[in-house]
Image (cartoon, rainbow, N blue to C red):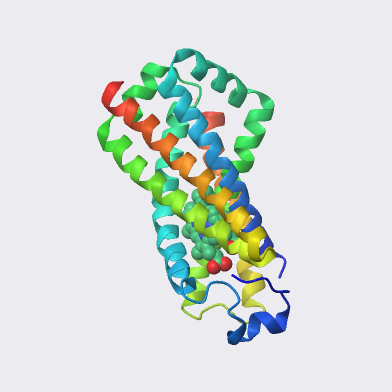
Amino acid sequence: MREQILSKAAIANPKTKYGDAKASTRHFLLQRLSGISNVLFLGFLIFIVTRLAGEDRAEMVEVIGNAWIGLPFAVLLVIVTLHMRNGMRDILEDYFAGRTYSLYMTLNTMWTLAIAVIGVFSILKLVFWG
Amino acid sequence: MAMSIVHRATGIANYAGSSLLVLWLAAAAWGAEPLNLVNAIYGSWLGQLVLFGYTWSLIHHMLGGLRHYVWDLIYGLEAGQREALSWANVIASVILTLLVWTIFVWVGN
Ligand code: HEM
């Protein structure tokens, strides 16, 4: 995205290529599809948290360590991080441009990647190694 | 309308909330001591307050997101309908959040 001052006219004019001209439709669809998956994620989350809040490790291993719960939850969590990164991109596109935007986008990618990796490894640990 | 910024704000709150979830999962994977520490923090009154807010944020954002699918099908876009949907969202999200906490936290445990 090139350096530009955002105004209503700039956003409305397709020639300014406000946002990412090549990828915005894909971003839009990713956000809709991952949003649907997130409804399922929320179901899992409420079940897992209300079942396990304040419980000890043995209980955590019993519930999340159950592959039928842990593995789908890990997949759903990865989709959440895609939705997180993509949604934050939407916000960053609105307030920043040029190099500032790129910098924040890099931080966004690193943060969501860390969430995905730590989350998935923690769940896999509980599932396969207890 | 002011409600679109709430969808954005709850999106950001959920972004932060994911860190709380992963911290808890990582502590459980790590061992008993880190898990006890996280449980103590999340179980404190401040922790519970944050988790209550996180619950509402997730539910409100989910309903707001579902509203986007309705809009994508070009329903509910008229003046009046938008405001009605906004109010329905606020009321439903508060009721659902209270329901989750009543059933699973205040009564269930
Ligand atoms: C629970 C089910 C969820 C649904 C149905 C959902 C749906 C959506 C939809 C449709 C959008 C796009 C709105 C637009 O085009 O303006 C969106 C944006 C967003 N979502 Fe979600 N979402 C859900 C959960 C989450 C979660 C768990 C997170 C974070 C971890 C999250 C973070 C965001 C962010 C940061 C945005 C961007 C907000 C903006 O552009 O202002 N969402 N969501």
Looking at the picture, does residue A43 appear above or below residue A9? above
Query: What count of labels does the image hold?
Result: 0
The residue at 58%/72% (across/down) is: A19
> Would residue A51 be found to the left or right of residue B92 on screen?
left
> In the rendered view, would you say A2 is above or below B108?
below
- Residue B96 appears in the rendering: yes
| Res. A3 image quadrant | bottom right
Which quarter of the rendered picture does the N terminus of chain B lie within? bottom right
- Residue B57 picture location, percent across and down: 60, 49
Residue shown at the point (69%, 64%) measured from the top left: A95
Q: Where is residue A74 drawn, in percent x and y?
A: 35, 40
Q: Toward which corner of the image does residue B16 lie, by quadrant? A: top right
Residue located farthest toward the top when viewing the structure as drawn:
B33
In the image shown, does B21 or A6 lie closer to the viewer? A6
Point out residue A58 in the picture as x, y percentages from the top left corner. 37, 17
Q: Nearer the viewer, residue B41 or A15?
A: A15
Is residue B65 visible in the rendered image? The answer is no
Residue occupying image coordinates x 68% and y 81%: A10
Residue at 63% over, 86% down: A13
Vertical order, A37 against B82 (above or below) = above
Q: Measuring from the top left, give residue A115's x and y in whole percent.
A: 48, 40
Is residue B89 placed above or below B72 in the rendered structure?
above
